[in-house]
Image (spheres, helix red, strand yellow):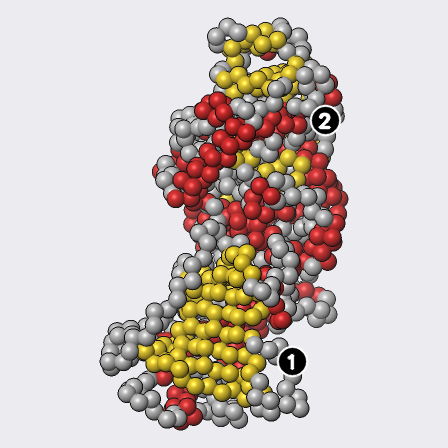
């Protein structure tokens, strides 16, 4: 029970004492803090990093609110009590409220879901509203999240109490209506029942897309027919449109979805368009079916994904990669932007011409770049515009009339119903007063200039967090990963409050302002700053781009992954500077105290995991594990006959240059009862110049000694760095294998650790170049590098997985050139292009490359393989 006069320190000290009472034999207390500081004294009686209980209030039960609920339910915020207030009568947020005809998500369904609740059973590539709504209900029920939600409760006021270090929150009970409006001055649906409560943490998870607005057109209430809004659609209202004459205002996302959904129902529809817009194919369209249509998944495919979670994850990663790799589309003047504009112009013109409305192309094609407004996939929209039932009316609507609408020219259009697809208020201004420190009302400070830090925190608003606030990645890809990263970031800050003796956290006053200045300066480089009216600028042409993050989603995720605590002011519960480390507590960890009180039932050896980072290995070893000098041993065992006219080459400066392996016969899984041997010969030595070096080309056959059959043949190039210039032949130029000028069709991750080369060398390649830094540094590298053959073999495996179904019999040849090394710990991506060309045995010509994710360099290039595909478009992973 919190009393009106109780300070934050008094409340927390009492709370900590109650925790200490559970461990009466914890070794007493630090007597030096008795009578000096109640909180410090209480802390000295509990374990290090014991999270003190806190109360969280979250506003909204859409995806963002449920993510917070999952964080609490899964233990990411131990000791947290959570209450979610939702103004509507059901959970789901945007997907509860929006139910207009054709309502769907233009993000691929398999990437519009929680990472912790994957759903392999989506019906189609792009999910409709009902499927998403049902997914949300299912996730909430299966994860027991509904218990946190109070439906039909609308937060109407929040005020920070500096003495208590808590938010005082006013909640209005609603009358049970399905969709409630939360907007300044709107009290419709509120009852007389008011709840006054408080919390340590206030999280605004209301989102952007549910504060809908009527168009600013005079005379709306004078219209005698049916007045509908896309974001407040009555159940089954589309049936009332049968055989009617309808006006549809707006050509944004909802308007583009509504028209094809009602065109067969209505007698006539007037589509009122104020400005041109790009109608594009969907995101990740190459996965969406023929011509970007909405692919319907077979029951067999859904079953396969449900049974093979690794395969399903790989598919989702492929689709996600397709979206993330397109961010440069939004950079003004980029090549991908130019290509997108050319493609969109051609496909819009083609569809309108085929529909007999070529004149519409001149009116609908924008002068600004693709993406200035959110690209709008429009399956069926352009075709519906070409229908005889449809008449397009360009320009502003001047007024509503009792019988319809009047445009600026004076022409009136008489209709039975008006559908307003006019979107939402995206001004970022909170819908109720939020009074922070120094009596600052966030409504006032954000009305003209919404400054936030990383879209999450605001100046003068301690312990207040927004999920998808100003400066969010709204313009690019799925919002669900963004919600998850923001929630994790909030949890990180809150855990620090709980465990390190702080009562509140707030960004330093200059931080949100500086962050916004950086954001706006960077956003000037993008197409979003072009001369178009967009939701990103709250419906204006010249508004500030305050709603968008200054970079890609991946850029934001990296920022959120590592909080900069120095950008915040932290209010200590023990303000005496001498008590800054009172949170070190009783000198024991939670695990130690649990072991003591639970009879040793706790793991007190977790720290031994760090031992894996201290490698005890021999840089060189022989067959009997004896220490040897690798280089002298290599020279002794491989000296052979000298190559006439070629100087002795230094093995210490040799790396792989490239290899081609041909599988001539199926290799048996065991050599038991048979004898195989490798037979190698030098087939070429080429002088590439003094600075470049010498290439020694070898051919190695795997041969059955008894039959003399060759099973595999490897042609390899060993490159001796800086050892050329001896006057030998330069040799033939390497064949350049071109690959398609498009994004890869398939990708596969290569993830290495510091241990990767140490484990791989156990195969027998004990070159210290892959174990200790000195040889690599002598060759111009940063230190030890990963075996080129590890990269080669891992890539062969990856290509075989994604194309050949992991079947060894499905690969005929594989070749690549080594372009740059991987360092231990690097992450890389195998990129695969399918050419669709097959040999007489059904093996497809494949191109591939490996790109280092850390520096963007190609690791393997000039890659080619002949693979027999298992199933087109389906990813297989073992």
Report the residue at 40% width, 82% height from top: 683
Check contact, mark 2 vs mark 1: CB within 8 A.
no
Report the residue at 40% width, 84% height from top: 682
Q: Is residue 140 left or right of residue 538?
A: right
- Image quarter where the N terminus lies is top right
> Residue 302: x and y, percent?
72, 51
> Residue 395: x and y, percent?
48, 16
Report the residue at 46% width, 48% height from top: 555
Mark 2 and mark 1: Cα distance apart in space: 65 Å
Q: Which image quadrant for residue 26?
A: bottom right
Instruction: Work out whether mark 2 precedes mark 1 in sequence or the reverse, and give the earlier one.
Output: 2
Q: Is residue 338 left or right of residue 405?
A: left
Q: Which of 681 and 120 lies nearest the eye of the viewer?
A: 681
Q: Vertically, is 639 above or below 734?
A: below
Q: Which of 23 and 643 lies nearest the eye of the viewer?
A: 643
Q: Residue furthest front?
A: 840
> Residue 505: x and y, percent?
50, 44
Q: Which image quadrant for residue 331?
A: top left
Q: Which image quadrant for residue 596?
A: bottom right
Q: Which of 467 and 14 lies nearest the eye of the viewer?
A: 467
> Residue 753: x and y, percent?
50, 69
Residue 520, numbered circle: none
Q: Which residue position is annotated with label 2?
A: 178
Report the residue at 32% width, 85% height from top: 649
Q: Secondary structure at mark 1?
A: loop
- Image quarter where the C terminus lies is bottom right
Q: Vertically, is 806 above or below 192?
A: below
Crowd class of label 2 (few under 14; some 14 to 19; many from 20; radius 10 Å): some
Residue 556 shows in this picture: no
Q: Which residue position is annotated with label 1?
A: 669
């Amino acid at each position: 029970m919190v009393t009106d006069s109780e300070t934050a320190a008094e409340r927390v000290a009492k709370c900590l004492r109650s925790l200490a009472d559970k461990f009466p034999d914890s070794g007493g207390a630090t007597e030096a803090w008795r009578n000096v500081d109640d909180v410090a004294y209480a802390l000295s009686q509990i374990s290090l990093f014991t999270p003190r209980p806190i109360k969280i209030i979250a506003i909204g039960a859409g995806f963002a609110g449920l993510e917070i609920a999952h964080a609490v339910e899964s233990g990411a915020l131990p000791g947290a009590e959570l209450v979610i207030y939702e103004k509507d009568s059901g959970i789901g947020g945007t997907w509860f409220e929006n139910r207009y005809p054709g309502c769907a998500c233009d993000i691929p369904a398999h990437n519009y879901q929680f990472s912790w609740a994957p759903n392999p059973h989506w019906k189609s590539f792009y999910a409709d509203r009902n499927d998403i709504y049902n997914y949300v209900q299912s996730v909430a029920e299966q994860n027991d999240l509904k218990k946190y939600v109070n439906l039909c409760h609308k937060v109407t006021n929040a005020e920070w109490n500096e003495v208590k270090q808590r938010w005082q929150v006013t909640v209005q009970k609603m009358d049970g209506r399905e969709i409630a409006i939360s907007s300044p001055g709107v009290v419709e649906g509120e009852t007389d029942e008011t709840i006054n409560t408080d919390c340590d943490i206030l999280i605004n998870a209301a989102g952007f897309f549910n504060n809908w607005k009527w168009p600013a057109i005079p005379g709306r209430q004078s219209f005698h027919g049916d007045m509908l809004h896309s974001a407040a659609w009555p159940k089954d209202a589309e049936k009332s449109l049968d055989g009617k004459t309808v006006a549809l205002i707006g050509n944004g996302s909802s308007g583009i979805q509504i028209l094809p959904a009602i065109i067969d129902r209505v007698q006539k529809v007037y589509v009122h368009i104020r400005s041109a817009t790009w109608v594009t194919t969907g995101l990740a369209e190459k996965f969406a079916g023929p011509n970007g249509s909405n692919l319907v998944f077979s029951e067999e495919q859904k079953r396969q994904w449900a049974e093979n979670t690794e395969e399903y994850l790989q598919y989702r990663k492929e689709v996600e990669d397709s979206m993330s790799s397109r961010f440069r589309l939004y950079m003004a003047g980029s090549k991908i932007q130019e290509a997108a504009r050319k493609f969109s112009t051609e496909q819009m013109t083609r569809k309108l011409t085929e529909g007999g409305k070529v004149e519409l192309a001149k009116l609908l094609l924008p002068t600004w770049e693709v993406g200035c407004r959110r690209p709008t996939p429009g399956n069926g929209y352009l075709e519906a515009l070409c229908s005889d039932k449809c008449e397009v009316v360009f320009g502003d609507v001047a007024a509503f009339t009792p019988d319809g609408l009047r445009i600026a020219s004076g022409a009136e259009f008489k209709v039975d119903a008006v559908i307003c697809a006019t979107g939402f208020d995206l001004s970022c201004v909170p819908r109720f007063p939020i009074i922070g420190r120094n009596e600052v009302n966030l409504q006032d400070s954000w009305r003209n200039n919404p400054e936030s830090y990383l879209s999450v925190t605001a100046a003068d608003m301690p312990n207040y967090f927004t999920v998808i606030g100003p400066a969010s990645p709204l313009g690019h890809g799925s919002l669900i990963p963004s919600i998850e990263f923001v929630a994790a970031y909030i949890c990180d800050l809150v855990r620090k409050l709980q465990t390190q003796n702080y009562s509140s956290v707030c960004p330093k006053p200059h931080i949100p302002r500086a962050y916004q200045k950086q954001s706006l300066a960077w956003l000037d480089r993008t197409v979003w700053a072009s001369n178009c009216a967009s939701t990103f600028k709250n419906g204006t042409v010249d508004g500030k781009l305050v709603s968008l993050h200054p970079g890609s989603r991946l850029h934001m995720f990296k920022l959120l992954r590592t909080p900069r605590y120095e950008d915040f002011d932290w209010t200590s519960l023990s303000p005496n500077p001498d008590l800054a480390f009172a949170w070190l507590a009783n000198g024991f960890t939670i695990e130690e105290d649990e072991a003591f009180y639970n009879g040793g039932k706790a793991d007190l050896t977790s720290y031994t995991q760090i031992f894996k980072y201290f490698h005890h290995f021999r840089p060189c070893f022989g067959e009997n594990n004896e220490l040897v000098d690798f280089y002298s041993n290599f020279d002794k065992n491989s000296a052979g006959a000298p190559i006439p006219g070629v100087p002795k080459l230094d093995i210490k400066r040799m790396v792989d240059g490239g290899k081609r392996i041909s599988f001539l016969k199926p290799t048996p899984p065991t050599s038991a009862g048979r004898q195989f041997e490798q037979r190698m010969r030098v087939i070429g030595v080429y002088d590439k110049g003094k600075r470049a070096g010498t290439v020694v080309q070898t051919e190695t056959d795997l041969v059955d000694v008894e039959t003399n059959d060759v099973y595999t043949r490897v042609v390899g190039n060993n490159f001796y760095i800086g050892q050329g210039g001896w006057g030998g032949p330069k040799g033939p130029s390497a064949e350049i294998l071109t690959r398609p000028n498009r994004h890869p069709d398939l990708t596969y991750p290569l993830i290495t650790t510091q241990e990767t080369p140490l484990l791989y060398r156990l195969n027998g390649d004990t070159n210290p170049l892959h174990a200790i830094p000195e040889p690599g540094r002598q060759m111009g590298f940063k230190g030890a590098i990963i075996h080129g053959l590890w990269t080669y073999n891992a890539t062969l495996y990856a290509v075989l997985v994604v194309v050949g179904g992991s079947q060894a019999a499905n690969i005929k040849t594989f070749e690549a050139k080594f372009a740059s090394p991987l360092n231990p710990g690097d992450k890389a991506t195998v990129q695969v292009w399918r050419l669709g060309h097959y040999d007489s045995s059904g093996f497809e010509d494949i191109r591939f490359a490996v790109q280092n994710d850390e520096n963007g360099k190609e690791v393997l290039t000039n890659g080619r393989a002949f693979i027999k595909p298992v199933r087109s478009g389906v990813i297989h992973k073992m």
